[in-house]
Image: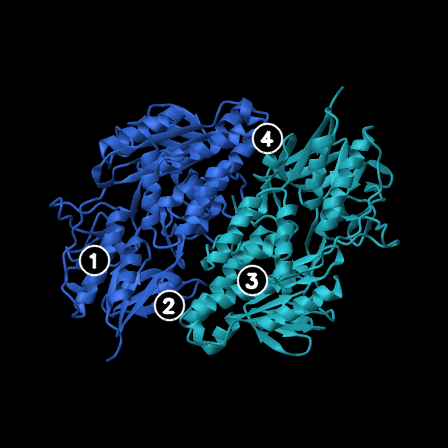
Chain colours: A blue, B cyan
Amino acid sequence: MSRSRVVVVGAGFAGYQTARTLARRAPRHVEVVLLNPTDYFLYLPLLPQVAAGILEPRRVTVSLTRSLPGVRLVLGEASGVDLDTRHVHYVDAEGRKGELRYDRLVLSVGSVNRLLPIPGVTQHAKGFRGLPEALYLRDHMIRQLELAAETEDPDERAARATFVVVGAGYTGTEVAAHGQLLTRSMARHNPVLRSAPPPRWLLLDIAPRVMPEMDERLSRTAERVLRGRGVDIRTGTSVKEATQDGVLLDDGEFVASRSLIWCVGVRPDPLVEEVGLPTEKGRLVVDEYLNVPGHPEVFACGDAAAVPDRTRPGQYTPMTAQHAWRQGKAAGRNIIASYGRGERAPYEHHDKGFAVDLGGIKAAANPWHVPLSGPVAGAVTRGYHLLAMPGNRVRVAADWFLDAVLPRQAVQLGMVRSWSVPLDTASPELARVPYE
Amino acid sequence: MSRSRVVVVGAGFAGYQTARTLARRAPRHVEVVLLNPTDYFLYLPLLPQVAAGILEPRRVTVSLTRSLPGVRLVLGEASGVDLDTRHVHYVDAEGRKGELRYDRLVLSVGSVNRLLPIPGVTQHAKGFRGLPEALYLRDHMIRQLELAAETEDPDERAARATFVVVGAGYTGTEVAAHGQLLTRSMARHNPVLRSAPPPRWLLLDIAPRVMPEMDERLSRTAERVLRGRGVDIRTGTSVKEATQDGVLLDDGEFVASRSLIWCVGVRPDPLVEEVGLPTEKGRLVVDEYLNVPGHPEVFACGDAAAVPDRTRPGQYTPMTAQHAWRQGKAAGRNIIASYGRGERAPYEHHDKGFAVDLGGIKAAANPWHVPLSGPVAGAVTRGYHLLAMPGNRVRVAADWFLDAVLPRQAVQLGMVRSWSVPLDTASPELARVPYE
């Protein structure tokens, strides 16, 4: 029997899980090819801890070749899909063009930083969607405090020690929580900054509360913890303009700062719109089997797909890792069913609660909707991440242990600079390269 | 009493130790300023283990502000010295010009990659002198093997799995030893490469034996271990030309490879020649007190200084970390003596032996000239490094432990690309930045 090829595009939560399910259960004559710009799966929820210097960057990566034996990895970035001839076009790791023929296609290309038409934001803000941005932010925070300590000008010192996070969702809240702890600890150990006002963190959101998409109790816990540490939370507030010297808020206040961190959310990868199939807010429309109507050979899942939410009729599933992970598994199974093995099944998932790590031993979690806070939530959150990661658990746990017993390291390696991490990019997983 | 300022330029082994000695013992009215492009001291001897993925890059860095309380750190790169007005000029972390007045000056700017006038080398070879190059090499080795697994062309596959190290000194020998183990382990875990010939490593040197500058027994041990693992050692051999496709050796053989690693040694930082004082092979001439003749306020030590070797009359001390470390201490003490505290003393040091880590549990060492090999040497070598590092010991030991019990991680983060690490650079400690 000639081989049939499934091409999975993108190895985020959805694509990784699709490939894993296929590798384990697909019939022998099915070849599984995974096209991804990096050779690793990134465990995104721990990215704020990379930025804060708690976890080394490799800790939150899981090698695709090692953890997915039997899957052929092609390093490259998809540039287009030809539905008629059934080919995916891509650009490989050395800039050369390539193409892959497919019999089944899974589009799991994920999402990128969401932009808003606010003057100056694209130039002066940095996103938080991949490892390059997390490492940039780590270096940037440390460098700003070092320069704050060097200068004799009190205004410059205050501006360099002020950090503005826009968007108080899950990511923005964690970035502010961990970032504030890092900068506070650095300032306390610095002979100059010790006697200056402590670093200032602002967390803005247009919504009336932090983490508006989550349970209200989670929200209240997070707000209480952050306010208690001195984070200046401004709900119902947005940015009017960003400049090199700071941020103008919509209430007229100007905040002098060199650090604008953009966590207003994500939008589907722009590749989705280019495929030429019906979309819904940039997401590829699929049925409850994660199948594109009229194209039995094309599947989509995760942030890039508009999946009907059977628990909330008329709506689509939210863009969360929890859904992407489970949709990947469902897509894998339904593809296997399309080869005559097993029955296809509609996707349905009731959310299992959330966990927000607030740094130190604080967290807010509601596993199976039981509200938790404080050290218990902290332990539950870290335990949850260890179980959820598809690899590298011992190394992550080791870093947590070292961070608990040793002072946090505060050095900047300077490998990722501003130019390499533009906010407006279709590939936040890669640092932009000047010229090879 | 008005304050007197000592400016130490460069925080390598020599400068770090000078600053530390001054911070601990200098009179109160002496201000110690350390000018350095990075905020950390780099423990260079463990760099090959960073390239091999054993140690995370931050492990081999020690924060200057944390470990040198009382020293004022200025982040910047020295661009010139004005001996008449006693000023050091520099470019700061954000590209702005600055200057520092000094009463005493210590030039400890270290060394950079040595170049040889061989066609193609500057374009196609990479050095091994700082963290950016080590991270580049780590990614590069992994990427080459991944691309070797992807291609269908057996010639391309062989070329991508061939690595050429030029220069079999301490650094080149360790890079080849650790690199070969990393690539061998990766290939064994890869379904495609497992059945191909194993990755090929060549270690070239013009000298008749590896590590020609060291004891012959060390040399023999290293050669035996590496040959036993299949490393192709070519002594008495040099490179005639480097191209994009490989390396032409002086015996006429062409080795197809995408990886030319340049470890032929170092030359003093080019800043030294620009100061306008007498030099010897690019090193600043100093007396046995590490003082520049005719300039009682200027000191130099480490690789950048030509220090008379009292144990070998008529010669200068070799450019090793061991000498730099001790010269830094001596320079610090002699500067303190110049303020009337204690007596100045001439620099004299008998070398204490060397230790070469060959990866796995193998090493070659001769502490106090007792020749050791095998696991005993391995333990002695690692113990020596832990004692010698001025900080971060627990984290280094933790990484060694994790590497002993877990499979090596083989993912490439792609933060440092070829363009950012040119061989011909005066600042190998920094990744080149496209535009800020």
Q: Residues within 10 Å of mark 1 (few under 14, many from 20)?
A: many
- Label 1, secondary structure: give it: helix
The residue labelled by disc 2 is A98
The residue positioned 47% from the left and 40% from the top of the image is A403
Q: Nearer the viewer, mark 3 or mark 4?
A: 3
The residue indicated by pointer 3 is B360
Of the two numbered discs 4 and 2 on the same chain, state the one appearing first in sequence.
Answer: 2
Chain ID at mark 2: A
**Above or below for A421 versus B412:** above
Q: Nearer the viewer's eye, disc 3 or disc 1?
A: 3
Query: Is the residue under label 1 in contact with that under label 2 (CB below 8 Å)?
Result: no
**Tags 4 and 1 both on a single chain:** yes
Q: CA distance from mark 2 to mark 1?
A: 29 Å
Q: Position of residue A37 (x, y in %)?
A: 39, 58
Callout 3 secondary element: loop
Residue A330 in the image, given as x and y percentages of width and height:
20, 57
Amino acid type at image mark 1: Ala
Q: For mark 2, does the 10 Å Cα neighbourhood hold few (<14), some (14 to 19), or many (20 or more) residues?
A: some
Q: Residue furthest front?
A: B376
